[in-house]
Image (cartoon, grey):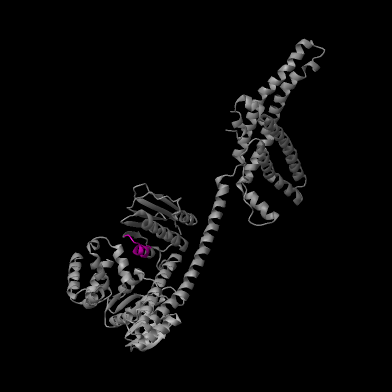
Amino acid sequence: MRVVIAEDGLIVREGIAGMLRRFGHEVVAAVGDAEALIAAVRAEKPDVVVTDVRMPPAFSDEGLQAAIALRKADPSLPVLVLSQYVEQTYASELLDSGPSKSVGYLLKDRIGEVEQFVDAMQRVAAGGTVIDEEVVRQLLGRRRDPLKRLTPREREVLALMAEGRSNTAIARTLVVTEAAVAKHIGSMLAKLDLPPDVDDHRRVRAVLAYLRS
Amino acid sequence: MSARNALEALTMRPTRFLRSSWPWRSLAYLAGGTLMGITTIIGGLALLGAGSVLSVVVVGLACYIAALLSGVAVGRLERVRMRLIDFDSLPPPHRPPPRPGLRAWLRFRLREQATWRELSYTMASAMVLCWMDAAVVTVSLFVPSTFLFAPIYLAGERSPLFTVPLTLLAPLALIIAAYPVTAWAGARAAMARAILAPRSDDVDAKLVEVTRSRARLVDAVEVERRRIERDLHDGAQQRLVALSMHLGLTRLEVPPGSAAAESLATAQGLVKDALAELRELIRGVHPKVLTDRGLAAAIGNVAGHAPVPVDLQVELDRRLPTHIEVAAYFVVVESLANVAKHSAASRASITASFRDEWLMLDIRDDGRGGADPSRGSGLVGLADRVAAVAGSVSLSSPPGGPTLVHVEIPCAS
């Protein structure tokens, strides 16, 4: 997979590049600011973009703005945004910038969980939606009924669903059977008045749309 | 309770009053008033006379200006003199001139309202008050002396049998005189105080200056906080992320289940905790989203981090000056922290809106109430911070709840 990385911190940038190469991906460009990111995407047409939110010159949210601009220009471009802080405002802006597919928003710390991180990037590249569990937690905290009716286990499943995980992956993470996961999801979607959908990504989008409404 | 000024002294028990120094100090005050008045008349006439004689040259103008400013000197003397019979000292109504130098001083003083009040006091004192002082002093001393010296000046006309007992009336007259002397001194000091005391117009400018300097301090602190946030973000945080990543990569090399793998997992867990703590620390120092997206977004985020569910009704359609946003933001953070720590609330709500160019912010919870800002809840510091942007914080927290923190900050652009 051909990847463009944008991250202003040299050690982290080189670290991500090395890690992705190790997993057999090709890092076609590793840049340190938003302008270079947009130029690199134009030149290289990568399969996926991994970018930090905060970059020079103003060290504000240039990376996020660049990601949004890239997605507006090409809605099918998979973009994974890394943030030092999980701010659901940023996540919402990113999700609102195009169809909620091929997009991800993760806390930068998740890079440490190397395999999960690479997996998340691959899922974004494959058209999936990956939202950090922390964002989901924040969104859950703000909503009142009917989320209150969800059981703790259902909330866990919801958070994992928002990360774009399949039933199998959720079952593995929670150490339960896949049938149990399906049951939780069914009752949860019913409580939230969402259509039970077979498609993982549409399911994620439905949940996110619900949370952010 | 002991008297603090001449008028209060009049209400003392007569035995105490007459033995006190009040009547004598009042007498001294009035005698001084007479002297001051007469000196003022002489000085004023001299200045005006010199002014008209010298009006052809510039010095004449200086004399006129000096006459106009005589009130400043008289006012100062009066404030000192007044301490004789009034223990509450009278602060000067003047502000320090903005620049050093005589010209700046003159220009500044002539523009001050207090200067003209002092001039009017000086004229009143010279034309009316000092003569009344003189009259009161004279009468109160003349009557007792008349009795005291009766045997001498009536020596040839009346028999000593009549004149000598008259002298016994002198102390009585003196005792009676103590009252009008003290009363007039008290009334005169009250008048002087009314005219010479600083007015709100004089002081407001000072308050504005104090507020401005506090606001400057808050701004400086804010700039410093941002620098710290930036340094932590670019330094420690980056390195910890890189460290965590390398630990993760190393874990892939180590056979699962080995002692090294466990140790690496522990190390990575520690790094993760360190990152989480650092993130919270940075958020506390300076929230990035506040600078980037403004108060509404920042409130949304801080509500998302709160341990209790928070209902939001934030209607802020525009950005505010940074110092206002920061002050309001930290009130929200501190209030929600208090909700989590002390209130045992199950829900909280935040409403924010503009009303007539005021930012109105309410943070409520359904907890047990009884919050006391004096017991170090951090709200006092926040009230200071909000006061520095000319706003106010009020707290209502009856025992049993609910608790409401209400913030108002003027934000007219």
| Residue B394 coordinates in the image, percent (x, y) | 42, 50
Q: How many marks?
A: 0
| Left or right position of B140 against A206 | right
> Can you tell which quarter of the image residue A187 is in?
bottom left
> Can you tell which quarter of the image residue B162 is in?
top right
Give the residue drawn at x 37%, y 76%. B266
Which of B131 and B91 lies nearest the eye of the viewer?
A: B91
> Can you tell which quarter of the image residue B342 is in?
bottom left
Q: Is residue A205 above or below residue B64?
A: below
Is any part of residue A58 visible from this angle? no
Give the residue drawn at x 55%, y 54%. B210
| Residue B380 coordinates in the image, percent (x, y) | 46, 53
* Magenta: main secondary structure: helix
| Left or right position of B115 against A173 | right
Q: Is residue B12 above or below residue A91?
A: above
Which of B345 and B390 lies nearest the eye of the viewer?
A: B345
Is any part of residue B196 visible from this angle? yes
Q: Is residue B247 above or below residue B281?
A: below
Residue farthest front in this picture: B259
Region of the chain picked out in magenta, as a range: B299-308
| Residue B100 coordinates in the image, percent (x, y) | 68, 57
Which of B108 and A149 lies nearest the eye of the viewer?
A: A149
